[in-house]
Image (tube, rainbow, N blue to C red):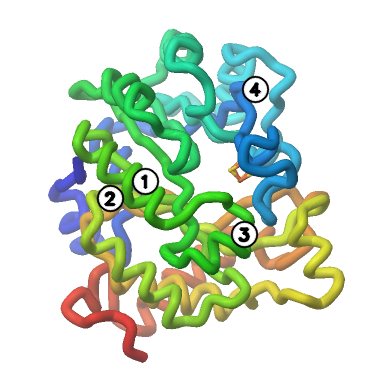
């Protein structure tokens, strides 16, 4: 299922340069909708030795959890704590249960159903988002996720694609190929499950052209959302060692903003952009430190689109890998 709506055209009229997921949620539900990151205590085949023990080169011991998430709390406690932290005013707010940390389809369907159902039983939850690896989506798990599809409910499957290039997946120590990603996306699409792909920009060894080829590859896929992440170096990861030994460099903010805008100009305008950059706590972030200034980066992205007078899909009629 790809989500087609008038939302993007309305956004363009309002001066937005890209199809923002948060604006889409606000338009659809007419209230504030926030994602609650959940650590369900599941593991990952790239950590428990099924595929590998060290994990992906960028992944911290917390399984790429959001800052402040605690797996020591029960699932209802995590949701309640997040709601308290998000409470800013009396604004009408609904929530999406976002299974984020580790691999959230890495358990028998019966166990997964218990976890998903428990999250949905909490008050004001109007959606479910499941983050996972492409090689952890057997048909029975996809059938389970599809069973949550219904009108007025926000269902998303977030697949860690990262790049369309196998050499980059190897560098990242992902332990899966791009074919695994394509297979998972097409089996999810057959079940009308909206898919968001997680992508990383700035992978060492990837050229600008490589990144644009990944952008162009999205055009033919039944993908409804994209989540961007700049490659950042987290304390305690394999990447930190490489960085400290001078074997990799992080992108400068200006480079990231430019590449990101180049990418967004090449992808279909109806793909919803869930996120534009990664997020980390100061004490765990090694580099690049500009990642701590989210507001500055977001403004720089808007300014860059304004300077170019372009927007999402602006270069859709080109093959997209030219300069
Ligand atoms: S698949 Fe996810 S949880 Fe597992 S090591 Fe990689 S990033 Fe971390």
Q: Is mark 1 within 8 Å of ligand 1?
A: no
Image quarter for ligand 1 equals top right
Q: Residues within 10 Å of mark 2 (few under 14, many from 20)?
A: many
Upstream in sequence: badge 4 or badge 1: 4
Q: Check if mark 2's residue and mark 4's residue have beta carbons within 8 Å.
A: no
Q: Check if mark 2's residue and mark 1's residue have beta carbons within 8 Å.
A: yes
Residue that label 2 marks: 223
Q: Is any atom of residue 88 visible in this view?
A: no
Pinpoint residue 303: horizontal percent, then vertical percent: 44, 75
Instruction: Check residue 59 in the rendering and tell me which mark sits there, or answer none.
Output: none
Q: Residues within 10 Å of mark 4 (few under 14, many from 20)?
A: some
Upstream in sequence: badge 4 or badge 3: 4
Please identify the quarter of the rendering in which residue 158 is found. Answer: top left
Q: Nearer the viewer, mark 1 or mark 3?
A: 3
Q: Nearer the viewer, mark 4 or mark 3?
A: 3
Pinpoint residue 240: horizontal percent, then vertical percent: 79, 61
User: Marks 2 and 4, Cα distance to the nearest angstrom?
Assistant: 28 Å
Tag 1 secondary structure? strand
Residue that label 1 marks: 196
Q: Residues within 10 Å of mark 1 (few under 14, many from 20)?
A: many
């Amino acid at each position: 299922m790809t989500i087609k709506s008038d939302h993007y055209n309305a956004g363009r009229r309002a001066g937005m340069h890209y199809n923002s997921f948060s604006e889409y949620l606000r338009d659809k539900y007419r209230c504030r909708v926030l994602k609650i990151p959940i650590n369900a205590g599941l593991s990952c085949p790239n950590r428990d030795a099924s595929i590998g023990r060290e994990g992906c080169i960028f992944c911290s011991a917390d399984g790429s959890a959001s800052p402040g998430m605690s797996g020591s709390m029960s699932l209802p406690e995590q949701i309640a704590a997040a709601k308290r932290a998000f409470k800013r005013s009396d604004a009408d707010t609904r929530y999406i249960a976002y299974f984020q940390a580790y691999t959230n389809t890495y358990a028998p369907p019966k166990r997964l159903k218990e976890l998903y159902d428990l999250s949905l039983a909490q008050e004001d939850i109007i959606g479910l988002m499941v983050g996972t690896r492409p090689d952890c989506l057997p048909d029975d798990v996809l059938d389970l996720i599809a069973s949550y599809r219904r009108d007025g409910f926000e269902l998303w499957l977030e697949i860690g694609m990262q790049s369309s290039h196998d050499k980059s997946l190897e560098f990242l120590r992902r332990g899966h190929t791009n074919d695994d990603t394509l297979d998972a996306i097409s089996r999810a699409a057959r079940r009308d499950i909206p898919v968001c792909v997680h992508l990383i920009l700035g992978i060492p060894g990837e050229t600008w052209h490589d990144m644009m080829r990944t952008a162009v590859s999205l055009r033919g896929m039944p993908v409804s959302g994209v989540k961007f992440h700049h490659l950042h170096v987290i304390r305690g990861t394999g990447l930190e060692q490489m960085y400290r030994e001078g074997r990799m460099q992080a992108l400068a903010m200006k480079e990231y903003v430019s590449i990101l805008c180049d990418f967004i100009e090449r992808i279909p305008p109806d793909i919803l952009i869930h996120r534009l950059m990664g997020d980390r706590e100061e004490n765990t972030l090694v580099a690049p430190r500009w990642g701590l200034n989210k507001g500055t980066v977001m403004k720089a992205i808007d300014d860059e689109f304004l300077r170019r007078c372009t927007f999402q899909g602006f270069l859709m009629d080109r093959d997209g890998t030219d300069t």
